């Protein structure tokens, strides 16, 4: 087995390598003056089972291109099997046509990864589960839920907890976590009653006195989360914490979170955290390295991956 990576998340790759007890293979990723990417794999990979760790996070296009070129290099070097390990699958939010003459970019990216030569994909908390079907190669979608539920139960009495979906679209994900920890579920329902009027946040469920746990797949600008936290506090929640798998955190998101009513935002290291994230007083990062490492090990040994979540 070989483990290698582009420049997207070296810390996570190192943690995965440590879990597996192997070294990261020697690869150089360089840029020509015009920013074209040039990649060299400095080890023989002929006949090997190769895992390429590369979340397609900011700068998304550069990291995606690195992933594609790495896969191409490995295919031409006769790797036996190439698994694209993409803990954060960028472009996932473009999974349908929002209007006429718009792309389905998530499908395009899935095609690019397959056509580059990947034999399998290993990813985490896809924005929409059906993106799995955009690939015609085996695709394992892992869940951060076991990592999150362990942390939630370590820090709360379960009878005080209310799991909350920040919007109607996230109910399935939130319900699964609620079921896993044995807590009830509440939903933030955003509605604009009339065009031109601001959105009203209705809370479905009684959150009075509860430690609310907001669950989502992505935090980007932080708008969804901060608004939901405020609505929950206004409805009498004792505290609001959020568990979000992918900390995209673009623009002024970190400042928005630190100034918000959130007691804490917990994200994973599917995306390499920036200094601002690491220094924020109310943001904590949990590692998914062991989860990914175990899934890689099971894939290499032809064992069940789904049983990781039983
Ligand atoms: C939306 O469907 C996603 O699940 C997230 O709720 C969304 O991407 C969060 O974006 P933001 O942090 O910019 O509100």
Image (cartoon, helix red, strand yellow):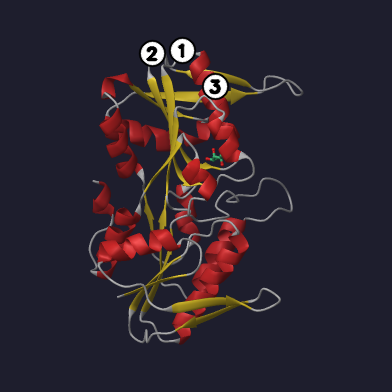
Q: Is residue 270 left or right of residue 231?
A: left
Using the image as rendered, state which of residue 250 and residue 309 is in the foreground. Answer: 250
Which residue is the site of mark 3?
A: 230
Residue 123: percent from left, percent from top = 42, 57
The label on residue 209 is 2
Residue at left 50%, top 30%?
166
- Asked whether the residues under the numbered discs 1 and 2 touch, taking CB atoms below 8 Å apart as contact, a structural biologist would say yes
Residue, far right: 196
Q: Is residue 145 left or right of residue 128?
A: left
Residue 199: percent from left, percent from top = 66, 23
Q: Which comes before the other along the chain, label 1 or label 2? A: 2
Which residue is the site of mark 1?
A: 236
Q: Quadrant of ligand 1?
A: top right
Identify the secondary structure beneath mark 1.
loop
Using the image as rendered, state which of residue 210 and residue 72 is in the foreground. Answer: 210
Identify the secondary structure beneath mark 3.
helix
- Asked whether the residues under the numbered discs 1 and 3 touch, taking CB atoms below 8 Å apart as contact, a structural biologist would say no
Structural distance between the alpha carbons of marks 1 and 3: 10 Å
**36 above or below 136?**
below
Residue 194: percent from left, percent from top = 72, 20
Neighbours of disc 2 within 10 Å: few (<14), some (14-19), many (20+): some
């Amino acid at each position: 087995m070989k483990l290698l990576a582009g420049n997207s998340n070296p810390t996570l790759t190192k943690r995965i390598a440590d879990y597996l007890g192997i070294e990261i293979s020697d690869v150089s990723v360089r840029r020509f003056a015009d920013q074209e990417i040039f990649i060299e794999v400095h080890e023989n990979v002929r006949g090997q089972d190769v895992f390429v760790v590369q979340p397609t996070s900011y700068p998304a296009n550069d990291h995606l291109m690195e992933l594609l070129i790495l896969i191409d290099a490995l295919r031409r070097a006769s790797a036996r099997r190439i698994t694209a390990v993409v803990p954060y699958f960028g472009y996932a939010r473009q999974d349908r046509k929002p209007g006429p003459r718009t792309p389905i970019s998530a499908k395009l990216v899935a095609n690019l990864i397959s056509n580059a030569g990947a034999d399998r994909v290993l990813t985490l908390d896809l924005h929409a589960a059906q993106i799995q079907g955009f690939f015609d190669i085996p695709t394992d979608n892992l869940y951060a839920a076991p990592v999150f539920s362990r942390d939630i139960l370590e820090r709360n009495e379960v009878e005080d907890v209310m799991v909350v979906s920040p919007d109607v679209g996230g109910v399935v994900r939130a319900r699964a976590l609620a079921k896993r920890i044995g807590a009830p579920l509440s939903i933030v329902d955003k509605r604009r009653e009339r065009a031109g009027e601001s959105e009203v946040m209705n809370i479905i469920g009684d959150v009075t006195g509860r430690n609310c746990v907001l669950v989502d797949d992505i935090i980007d600008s932080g708008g969804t989360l901060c608004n939901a936290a405020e609505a929950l506090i206004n409805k009498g929640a004792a505290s609001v914490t959020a568990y979000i798998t992918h900390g995209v955190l673009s623009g002024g998101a970190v400042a928005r979170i630190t100034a918000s009513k959130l007691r804490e935002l917990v994200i994973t290291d599917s995306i390499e955290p920036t200094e601002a994230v690491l220094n924020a007083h109310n943001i904590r990062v949990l590692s998914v390295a062991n989860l990914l490492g175990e899934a890689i090990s099971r894939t290499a040994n032809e064992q069940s991956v789904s049983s990781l979540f039983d």
